Image: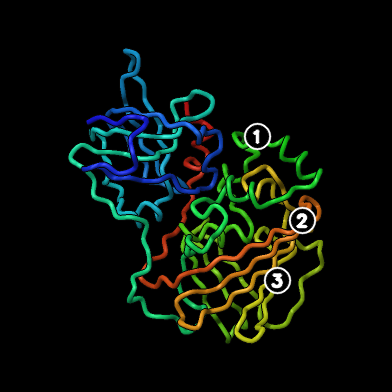
């Protein structure tokens, strides 16, 4: 078995796994570099927000152990992985993005297992998937509908889309993503629209509950559950603030308009070190397409405390009733692993 740094993404007998956006994802990693090594799997950790495996290998005549970060369990499972796909004793070749500080820690790009692994591509919606009659149900983002950096979410996407003001730039400059200032090192998620924008990997589920005059939006992303109040209420006093914000909704014809305000402070909601606070305001619009297969979504985020101009974005969700929802069950030890790996 031989894997080189210039190997292409798919080879005979090889299972390919592109790195996925995750909670800290690229923090402290050299995403412009690829390393390649062969070795023996010593341990597998099937945990969220990231699974890991340890590989023992020989480098410069010395035995070293690499800690390799993978995606979340739900993302891996939809590509054909299970907790037994890799096991201690397996011989593997790995291509990965290394840590910037020289630690034996990396984000997996591809893996080849002796004897071959047979994994499916990212789960999609079959052509015969029945149309939806409303926005209720399970949905994944149609990544082809995202014009700006469709394969990414964290650093690349937001860095290209957000325009921080002077206060925002100063906060970014002082942020260390490899410290516990990073909220997600303690399993703290990010406020809307983050769950929406990462739904290419993490399933969303809408439920319309007319008897309660609410709509709920559940995400696999940190088990986020948003309640959208449809009873005509207003937002509470600005001093009353919530981690996920306070969402009120209304129907404008066939379009659901969701207005979310009253956000609690968050140190890095875009994983860029750019904060958000009580002035953050998000308006989302959801409209089912005529054929019932997609939802058109428009998002506008304003935050004059930290942003020079609004963030505006359009995407589509694709009806995915064939997919199962996975709990996040974020493990704090796993969430901090990128900080403490040696």
Sequence-wise, which precedes: disc 1 or disc 3? Answer: 1
Contact between marks 1 and 3 (CB within 8 A): the answer is no
Q: Secondary structure at mark 1?
A: loop
At 46% from the left edge and 80% from the top edge, which residue is drawn?
292
Indicate left or right for 144 with 274 as reference. Answer: left
Residue 275 relative to residue 67: left or right: right
- Residue at 44% x, 73% y: name it: 319
Q: Position of residue 123 (x, y in %)?
A: 36, 61
Q: Is 71 rendered above or below residue 133?
A: above
Colouring method of the image: rainbow
Residue 237 appears left or right of 213: right
Query: Sequence order check: which comes first, mark 2 or mark 1?
Result: 1
| Residue to which mark 1 is pinned | 176
Q: Position of residue 145 (x, y in %)?
A: 51, 64
Q: Which mark is residue 309?
A: 2
Vertical placement of residue 97 versus 269, above or below: above
In the rendering, which numbered label is found on residue 259?
3
Q: Residue 324, relative to residue 11: is it above or below?
A: below
Give the total of numbered labels: 3
Camera-nearest label, 2 or 1: 2
Q: Residue at x 32, y 29 (%)?
A: 4
Q: Quadrant of the N terminus?
A: top left
Residue furthest top in the image: 61
């Amino acid at each position: 078995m031989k894997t080189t740094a210039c190997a292409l993404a798919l080879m005979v007998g090889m299972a390919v796994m592109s790195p996925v956006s995750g909670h800290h994802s690229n923090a402290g990693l050299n995403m412009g570099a690829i390393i390649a090594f062969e070795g023996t799997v010593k341990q597998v950790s099937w945990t969220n927000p990231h699974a890991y495996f340890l590989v023992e290998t020989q480098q410069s005549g010395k035995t070293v152990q690499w800690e390799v970060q993978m995606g979340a369990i739900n993302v891996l499972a939809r590509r054909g992985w299970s907790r037994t796909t890799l096991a201690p004793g397996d011989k593997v070749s790995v291509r990965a993005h290394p840590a910037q500080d020289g630690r034996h820690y990396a984000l997996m790009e591809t893996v080849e297992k002796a004897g071959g692994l047979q994994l499916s591509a990212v789960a999609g919606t079959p052509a015969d998937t029945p149309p939806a009659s409303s926005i209720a149900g399970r949905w994944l983002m149609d990544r082809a509908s995202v014009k700006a950096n469709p394969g990414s979410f964290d650093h690349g996407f937001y860095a290209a889309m957000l325009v921080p003001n002077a206060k925002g730039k100063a906060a970014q400059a002082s942020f260390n993503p490899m410290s516990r200032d990073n909220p997600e090192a303690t399993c703290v998620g990010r406020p809307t629209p983050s769950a929406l924008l990462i739904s290419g990997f993490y399933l969303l589920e809408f439920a319309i509950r007319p008897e309660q005059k609410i709509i709920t939006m559940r995400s696999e992303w940190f088990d986020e559950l948003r309640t959208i109040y449809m009873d005509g209420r207003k937002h509470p006093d600005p001093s009353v603030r919530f981690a996920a914000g306070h969402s009120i909704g209304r129907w404008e014809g066939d379009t659901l308009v969701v207005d979310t305000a009253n956000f609690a402070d968050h140190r890095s909601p875009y994983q860029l070190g750019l904060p958000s606070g009580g002035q953050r305001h998000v308006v989302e619009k959801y409209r089912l397409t005529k054929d019932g297969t997609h939802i058109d979504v428009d998002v506008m985020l304003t935050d004059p405390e930290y942003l020079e101009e609004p963030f505006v974005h359009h995407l589509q969700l694709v009806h995915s009733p064939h997919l199962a929802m996975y709990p996040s069950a974020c493990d704090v030890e796993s969430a901090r692993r990128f900080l403490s790996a040696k």
